[in-house]
Image (tube, rainbow, N blue to C red):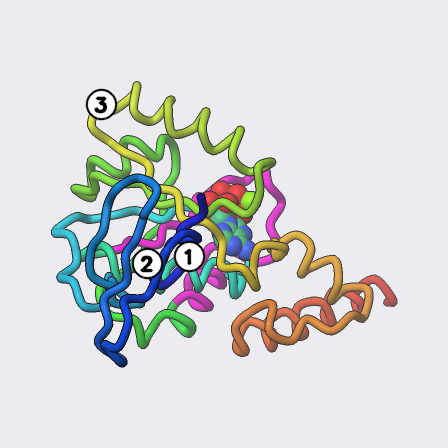
Amino acid sequence: MILLSHGQSAGAKRLPNRGASAKIKVGVRFGFSGPVLPRHILMTQPRLDVIAIYPGSFDPITSGHLDVIERGSKMFSRVIVAILQNEAKQPLFTIAERMEMLRECLGGISGVEIGTFKGLLADYAVARNASVILRGIRAISDYEYELQMAHMNRRLRPGLETVFLPAGESFSFISSRMVKEVISLGGNIEGLVPRPVEEHLRRRIGQQKSTTAD
Ligand SMILES: Nc1ncnc2c1ncn2[C@@H]1O[C@H](COP(=O)(O)OP(=O)(O)O)[C@@H](O)[C@H]1O
Ligand SMILES: [Mg+2]
């Protein structure tokens, strides 16, 4: 049985003659019935008094990352978006540039901070008083690696929990890597990254093309 998004189950029945405030039986086949849940229940609930860290490369931030940050910020009292300094990855943007882009895109979201770290995420989490690591899952292929990391981080710091958010349905195919590839081949990336990032990408790819043409 599939629970539908309005708290109505596939086997649910609307009670007769109660108009808009009608209660809907949910989970009928499990023998549970209750009122309709508000559609955006977390928006009406206080945030958990928890500091969460959302770590990543953010090279650059995409619309998928932004969606995870916005949703996370409604769940947790603070979300620290933390850029991992990892020289091995040969990034397109420097840490300072990535921070600047995050600042431009996250300014309007309350409870969000930006940080950067080197070394173990588990140590950084403790240093920032965070008890949750927030990660986004786009597909099963993400899950295997993410699961290993979650277990490892909990082993390193017992009590440090990882919370996975499923990627928003319109963003689950987006990766920073693919966005960079598409724009460098002249494709349209509108909507795949926040507007200011589109400009930064255009400029950087343009610069790269003019230096290789020299
Ligand atoms: N389009 C997306 N939607 C939701 N989550 C995403 C998306 N792209 C990446 N993520 C998640 O955001 C986090 C950071 O991603 P990324 O910047 O690629 O850093 P990393 O180098 O750790 O993979 C990861 O948990 C990744 O799975
Ligand atoms: Mg990645």
- Count residues near mark 2 (Cα–Cα under 10 Å), then give few for <14, some for 14-19, many for 20+: some
Q: What residue did someone put label 3 on?
A: 158
- The stretch drawn in magenta includes residue 28: no
- Please state which amino acid type lies under the numbered disc 2: Gly
Q: Residue at x 37, y 59 (%)?
A: 69
Residue 7 has which mark? Answer: 2
86 in relation to 153, above or below:
below
- Percent x, y for residue 123? 27, 31
Q: Quadrant of residue 106?
A: bottom left
Q: Quadrant of residue 75?
A: bottom left
Residue 105 shown left or right of residue 21 in the figure: right
Q: What is the CA distance from the residue labelled 1 to the residue labelled 3?
A: 35 Å
- Percent x, y for residue 184? 77, 64
Residue 109 shown left or right of residue 141 in the figure: left
Q: What residue did someone put label 1 on?
A: 4
Q: Nearer the viewer, residue 201 or 39?
A: 39
Looking at the image, the residue that sits furthest to the top is: 155
- Please state which amino acid type lies under the numbered disc 1: Leu
Secondary element at image label 1: loop
214 in relation to 172, above or below:
below
CB under 8 Å between callouts 1 and 2?
yes
Residue 58 shown left or right of residue 204 in the figure: left
- Please state which amino acid type lies under the numbered disc 3: Pro
Earlier residue among tags 1 and 3 = 1
Q: Nearer the viewer, residue 193 or 114?
A: 193
Q: Specify start and end residues of the magenta stretch as a single range.
A: 79-102
- The stretch drawn in magenta includes residue 94: yes
